[in-house]
Image (cartoon, grey):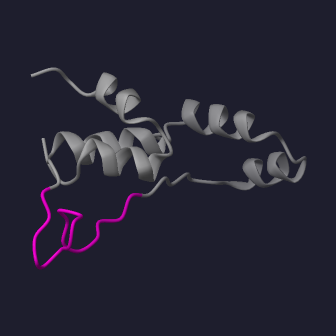
Amino acid sequence: MHVEKGCAHCGPTGFRGRTGVFQVGVFGPSHSEWLAGDPPEHEIRERLGREGMQPLSAEVLQRVASGVTSPREAARVAGLGVEDLRNELPQE
């Protein structure tokens, strides 16, 4: 698991460069009509989740598990607590 150390090149962050983390959903004509009705955000997330869209937290967990980023940075990006992310990671 990545642990931030910092150096002269990255400052105190322990990271160099940036890696995008995205949440993408596929929308069709039925979605357009449904979204025009202004459903609450939780209903949008639930429907798109049922249709296969991964939540942002799943994407950042993959980045942590592969060593691309740290739990602290992943938690910041996903808007979750560090402990929330640590509880989701596979135990070694």
Against 12, is 26 above or below?
Answer: above
Residue 40 x, y percent position in the rendering: 81, 39
Residue 36 x, y percent position in the rendering: 87, 53
The quarter of the rendered structure image containing the N terminus is top left
The structure residue drawn at horizontal position 21% and vertical position 66%, both measured from the top left corner, is 12
Residue 17 x, y percent position in the rendering: 23, 74
Number of numbered tags placed on the structure image = 0
Asked if the magenta segment contains residue 41, the reply would be: no
The structure residue drawn at horizontal position 74% and vertical position 41%, both measured from the top left corner, is 41
Against 9, is 28 above or below?
Answer: above
Q: Which of 74 and 40 lies nearest the eye of the viewer?
A: 74
- Mainly helix, strand or loop, the magenta region? loop
Magenta segment? 5-21
Q: Quadrant of residue 20?
A: bottom left
The quarter of the rendered structure image containing the C terminus is top left
Q: Is residue 91 left or right of residue 19?
A: left
- Residue with the most extreme right position: 37
Asked if the magenta segment contains residue 13, the reply would be: yes
Q: Which of 7 and 2 lies nearest the eye of the viewer?
A: 7
The structure residue drawn at horizontal position 20% and vertical position 65%, both measured from the top left corner, is 15
Against 39, is 12 above or below?
Answer: below
Residue 5 x, y percent position in the rendering: 12, 57
Q: Which of 19 and 35 lies nearest the eye of the viewer?
A: 19
